[in-house]
Every structure is written in structure tokens, then in C-alpha cells.
Image (cartoon, rainbow, N blue to C red):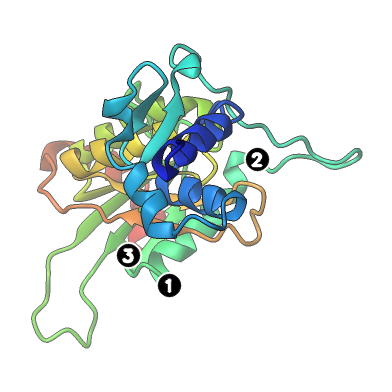
Amino acid sequence: MVTSRQIVRQKAIELLEKAPDGIRFSDLVRAIEAECPDIPRGTIAGSLQDWDKGEPEKVYKPARGLFRHTRFREEVAPAKEDVPPAGTQAPSEESFYEPFAEWLVRELEECTKAIPLGRNKFKDKWGTPDVIGIREPRKSDIIKPPTEIVSAEVKLDTANVITAFGQACSYKLFSHKSYLVIPSDSPEEDLARVDALCRIFGIGLILFDRRKPESPNFEIRVRAAKHEPDMFYANKYLRFVEEDLFR
């Protein structure tokens, strides 16, 4: 006699065979629940608990909470590309700099002033932040905190998430806080690993909708940890933006 557990796992296998990127645990439970309404949700969830350990030849977990069929283990899911309608132009990475600078100030309140930067403003092989900001004490502050520098790397191409993480790490040399800003539709496995790395290294992680520069819907996933930068490099690089950032 076929058990509910066997039915659930067989259905899960069928679903995973059609999903090269894998399926999140909660999404998998909902999908099976829709196709097998006679099986209680709790039974479905319980049947998938540690499933990857029971059938390692069929399923594995490339990241926390993500199931993937082993047939896709050696494949790297291609980065998703938005093909703009005929006659239109895809948004540029630079078009997100100003909205994120404003979001840093208005929404996240990490800065009292932030400006888009990018290109090679710092004239250095270590790179230039796409957005840089400062947090200075306000007149209303009873205890005046010291000035803080906040830098951010914005990446539109989901295929270069790891490179972008390295750049965000390098900004800690001269910044109190550093943020990595990447598309929310980045490959799930990449997102999970970058999330873990950001928590280890104290880098902030922000997700956004890369299709809408006018309304990117920035969402914080990991808040940046504050640390003390090397003041030699902080002063060296801030001289390039002193008039724009501190006036």
C-alpha cells in the first residue's frame, strides 16, 4: 500500500524535475497541497523533513530551505535576463544610484546625506562605490555621535553577484558601513550564500526590483554592521567627494 509519505515525496520529485533553480520548502509544500488536497499540510511538511538525507541520490539542498533535484547539481542556472519590449531600452545600472541614495537617507535613515558616485571617481584599482553617504549629528541630538561613512555597491547583473560582494568588502577599508545592493531575482542559491557571507563579514544586503528604476522597491535583508575604517584611507578617498558630500 502506498503511504502518504511516499505520495508526497514522489510528487515533490516530479515538481523538482521541472525546476532547475530548485524550489523553496514552503513553496514546495503549497504546490503539493494544491495537487494533493486529501493529504493534510502537516503530513506534507513532515514528509519533506530531512528528505534530502533520506534520498540523497534524488534530491539535495544547495542552500538552507531550498530543495533541488540532483540532475541539476552540476548545472549553473543561467542569470535571468529581462528582454525589454521592442522600441524600449533596459534600465541602466546608473539609473538606480540616485534612488538608492535617497532611500539610504529617507527610508533606511543610515545617512543624513548620500550621493551617487560610480565610475572611477576615486581613481583607484580598488574601485569606487556606486553610492556614498555620511551620517552627521543632527541639531536635535542630545549626544552628538561622530561622523560615519556609508558606501554601497549596486549590481544590476545577477551573474556578477560574487564580484559585487568583493567590491562591497573592499569599501570597508574607508567606510563605517558597507552595503551590497543586488536584484531580488538573483539565483536563489547565490542569494543564500551571499546572505550568509554578508552576515559573517558585516556587509549590509539590500534587494531590489531591477525592472523599475522609478520604483525599485528596495528591501533590507541584512543590516550592515558598524566597524572602524582605516582613517588614512577614509581621508584619502573622501577628498575626492569633499565638496559634494560635506558642503
Q: Nearer the viewer, mark 3 or mark 2?
A: 2
Q: Could you tell whether 197 is left or right of 60 in the image?
A: left
Identify the residue under disc 1.
Answer: 106
Question: How far is disc 1 from disc 3 in space, using C-alphas?
Answer: 8 Å
Specify the quadrant that holds the C terminus. bottom left
Question: How far is disc 2 from disc 1 in space, using C-alphas?
Answer: 23 Å
Give the x, y percent position of residue 219: 44, 59
Give 69 or 187, whichever is nearer the viewer. Answer: 69
Is mark 1 in CB contact (under 8 Å) with mark 3?
A: no
Residue type at numbered disc 2 = Ser
Residue at 58%, 43% (x, y): give it.
94
Give the x, y percent position of residue 150: 29, 53
Q: Is residue 4 above or below residue 114?
A: above
Mark 1 falls on what kind of element? helix
Of the numbered discs 2 and 1, the one sitting upstream in the chain is 2
Give 157 or 228, whichever is nearer the viewer. Answer: 157
Give the x, y percent position of residue 189: 41, 32
Give 101 or 211, whichever is nearer the viewer. Answer: 211
In this rendering, does residue 103 appear at all?
yes
Residue type at numbered disc 3 = Cys
Badge 3 crowding class, 10 Å Cα cut-off, few under 14, some 14 to 19, many 20 or more, is: many
Give the x, y percent position of residue 112: 33, 69
Give 19 or 59, whichever is nearer the viewer. Answer: 59
Determine the residue located farthest toward the top in the rendered image.
74
Q: Which mark is residue 111?
A: 3
Identify the residue under disc 2.
Answer: 92
Q: Could you tell whether 111 is left or right of 244 in the image?
A: left
Is mark 3 in CB contact (under 8 Å) with mark 2?
A: no
Determine the residue located farthest toward the front in the rendered image.
1
